[in-house]
Amino acid sequence: FALLLSATLIDFEHKIIPNKITYPGTVLGVGLSLFRSDFIWLDSLTGIPVGAGLLLVVRFLGSLLFRKEAMGLGDVKLMAVIGAFAGWQAAILSIFLGSIVGTLYSIPLLIKEARTGRRTTHVISFGPFLAIGGLIAALAQDRIWTFLWPV
């Protein structure tokens, strides 16, 4: 959670997620998975390419659609960290939840722009929303998956 908080604060302020957070964070997530009783290391190793890979596809498609960089690679690397610590299912859930939280954050900004008639060109960092999604997924993924797909 300390890595997510650091990445969030830096991304809000500077619009980057430093490799000094993501690379060691990914390695740490895999390393700690070897000692967890509630989590197997294979889920950690699978979480890295699933989380980062899904976001890489979103980045690529967004760049094609908008004809400019839609998302930084820091967000992709942050998803590798989340996947390493929480597994592939939590990585998927993090992207989903982060998108919802990011949308809820952006709606008032869009309404304000529509009311004032002034369009801003500010960039909204996605990393903080991924971090919130990762935090929620890490704490409640079993309950959320059960709610979404009851047996």
Image: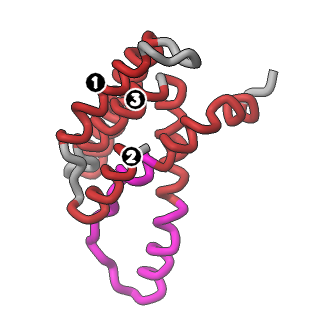
Position of 94 with respect to 68 (left or right) is right
Viewer-proximal residue among 131 and 38: 38
Q: Residue 50 lies in magenta, yes or no?
A: no
Q: Residue 120 lies in magenta, yes or no?
A: yes
- Asked which secondary structure carries label 1, the reply is helix
The image position of residue 42, as x and y in percent, is 44, 10
Q: Are marks 3 and 2 in contact (CB under 8 Å)?
A: no
Q: How far apart are marks 1 and 3 (CA)?
A: 15 Å
Residue 46 picture quarter:
top left
Mark 3: amino acid: Gly
Viewer-proximal residue among 110 and 140: 140
Residue for badge 2: 2
- Asked which secondary structure carries label 2, the reply is helix
Magenta-drawn stretch, dominant element (helix, strand or loop) = helix
Earlier-in-chain disc, 3 versus 2: 2
The image position of residue 111, as x and y in percent, is 50, 77
Locate the N terminus by quadrant: top left
